[in-house]
Image: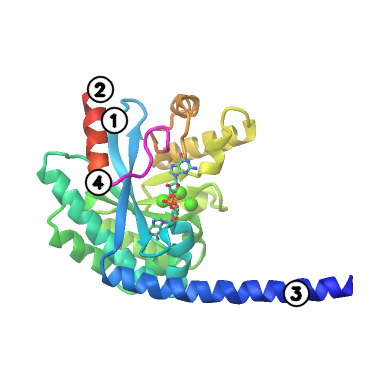
C-alpha cells in the first residue's frame, strides 16, 4: 500500500507539471491569438418570454487554436485571468461588441442590448469605466445598449469599492447584471446597496425546475426579490418549453438558453433575429 501511495504521488505531481506546461503554452498562444485577431465573438439571444422576441444578446468569446482547434472559455478564461491577459482581451470584446451594435443599428436591427462578461480582475483594473466610456463613444452608440455581466462573487470583496465603480458605470449610462445569481450569498439588504439592473438566475436552478421544488422555490424567490428591488430577471440555461413556461408563469421576464438559441456567429444571429421578429 505504501508503494502504491508513492507511485500515485509521482503520477499526481507529473500531472501537475503537465498541466502547468500546458497552461503556459496556452497562455503564449492566447497572447498571439489576441495580437493576430484570432478571437471571435458569438452571440446568444435573450428572449422576452411574453412576446417571444429577441431583445438582447450575450457576447461570448470564442477561440479557435491553430493546432488544437476550438478551446472553450471555461478552459482559456481562467488562464487569461491568472495572467491578467483578460484585461486587454476584455477590452477587445467590448470594442468588438460595440462595433457590432453599431453595425446592427445602422442596418435597422434596433433595440438589441448586448451584454459582455467582465471578470473580477478586469472589473477592478484601473480606469475600467474610462476605457469603456471611450470605446462606447468611439463607436457612436448609446451607452444603454451595452450591459456588463459580473458574477455575484465580485460583490463580496471590497463592497464599497465595487459600489463606487458601479456608480460610475451607471453614470455613464451602462446597465449592470449579476451573473450566476443564487450561487453566492447575497441578501436582499446587501444587494440593494449596488446599482444593479438585472439578476441572472443561474443555470443550476433552471435545469431541474420541473421536478425539484427547492430549485423552483429559489427561482421564485429570486423573481420576487428582483421585483422588490425594481430589477429585471433573466433565466439562464433554458433548454425546454416546459422550463420556459414555468419561468414565465412565475413572472420571470427574460430567458436565454439552447431552447431559444445557442451562442452563434453574427450572421446566424441576424437570421434568427429576423425570424423571431416576423412571428
Ligand atoms: P456564463 O457567463 O455563465 O455564460 C453562459 C454559458 O452557458 C455559455 O458557455 C453558454 O454557451 C452556456 N449556455 C447557454 N445556454 C445554455 C443551455 O441552455 N444549456 C447549457 N448547458 N449551457 C448553456 P460558454 O460560452 O462556454 O462560456 C462559459 C463561461 O466562460 C461563461 O459563463 C463566462 O463565465 C466565461 N466567458 C465567456 N466569454 C467570456 C468573455 O468574453 N469574458 C469573460 N470574462 N468571461 C467569458
Ligand atoms: Ca454571463
Ligand atoms: Ca451565467
Ligand atoms: Ca457561469
Q: Quadrant of residue 67?
A: bottom left
Q: Earlier in the sequence, mark 4 or mark 3?
A: 3
Query: Is the Cβ of the residue at disc 1 closer than 8 Å to that at disc 3?
Result: no
Secondary structure mostly seen in magenta is loop
Ligand 1 contact, mark 1 (Cβ < 8 Å):
no
Query: Is the Cβ of the residue at disc 2 closer than 8 Å to that at disc 1?
Result: yes
Q: Which residue is mark 1?
A: 53
Q: How many marks?
A: 4
In the rendered image, residue 81 lying in the magenta stretch gets the answer no
Can residue 114 be seen from the camera position used here? yes
- At x 45% / y 25%, what residue is drawn? 241
| Closer-to-camera residue (139/259) | 259
Give the image location of residue 195, x and y in percent: 37, 53
Tell me the CA gap for discs 2 and 1: 8 Å
Q: Quadrant of residue 109?
A: top left
Disc 4 is placed on an element classified as helix
Q: Earlier in the sequence, mark 2 or mark 4?
A: 4
| Closer-to-camera residue (156/113) | 113
Disc 1 is placed on an element classified as loop
> Mark on residue 266?
4
Q: Which residue is mark 3?
A: 9
**Disc 1 crowd, CA 10 A, few/some/many (<14, 14-19, 20+):** some
State which mark lies toward you, 1 or 3: 3
Ligand 1 contact, mark 4 (Cβ < 8 Å):
no
Residue range highlighted in magenta:
257-265
Tell me the CA gap for discs 1 and 3: 55 Å
Tell me the CA gap for discs 2 and 4: 20 Å
Give the image location of residue 31, x and y in percent: 35, 73
Q: Which residue is mark 2?
A: 279
Q: In the image, is 64 to the left or to the right of 131?
A: right
State which mark lies toward you, 4 or 3: 3
Amino acid at each position: 500500500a505504501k508503494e502504491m501511495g508513492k507511485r500515485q504521488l509521482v503520477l499526481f505531481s507529473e500531472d501537475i507539471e503537465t498541466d502547468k506546461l500546458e497552461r503556459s503554452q496556452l497562455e503564449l498562444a492566447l497572447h498571439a491569438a489576441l495580437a493576430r485577431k484570432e478571437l471571435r465573438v458569438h452571440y446568444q439571444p435573450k428572449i422576452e418570454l411574453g412576446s417571444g422576441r429577441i431583445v438582447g444578446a450575450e457576447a461570448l468569446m470564442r477561440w479557435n487554436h491553430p493546432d488544437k482547434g476550438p478551446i472553450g472559455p471555461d478552459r482559456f478564461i481562467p488562464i487569461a485571468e491568472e495572467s491578467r491577459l483578460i484585461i486587454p482581451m476584455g477590452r477587445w470584446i467590448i470594442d468588438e461588441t460595440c462595433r457590432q451594435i453599431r453595425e446592427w443599428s445602422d442596418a435597422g436591427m434596433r433595440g438589441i442590448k448586448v451584454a459582455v462578461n467582465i471578470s473580477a480582475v478586469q472589473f477592478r483594473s484601473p480606469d475600467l469605466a474610462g476605457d469603456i466610456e471611450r470605446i462606447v463613444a468611439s463607436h457612436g452608440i448609446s451607452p444603454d445598449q451595452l450591459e456588463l455581466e459580473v458574477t455575484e462573487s465580485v460583490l463580496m470583496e471590497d463592497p464599497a469599492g465595487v459600489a463606487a465603480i458601479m456608480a460610475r458605470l451607471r453614470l455613464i449610462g451602462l446597465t449592470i447584471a449579476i451573473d450566476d445569481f443564487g450561487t453566492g450569498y447575497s441578501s436582499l439588504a446587501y444587494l440593494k446597496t449596488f446599482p444593479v439592473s438585472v439578476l441572472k438566475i443561474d443555470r443550476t436552478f433552471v435545469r431541474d425546475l420541473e421536478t425539484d421544488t427547492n430549485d423552483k422555490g429559489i427561482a421564485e424567490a429570486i423573481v420576487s426579490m428582483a421585483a422588490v428591488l425594481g430589477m429585471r430577471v433573466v433565466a439562464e440555461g433554458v433548454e425546454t418549453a416546459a422550463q420556459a413556461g414555468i419561468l414565465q408563469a412565475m413572472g420571470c421576464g427574460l430567458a436565454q438558453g439552447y431552447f431559444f438559441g445557442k451562442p452563434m456567429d453574427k450572421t446566424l444571429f441576424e437570421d434568427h433575429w429576423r425570424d423571431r421578429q416576423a412571428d
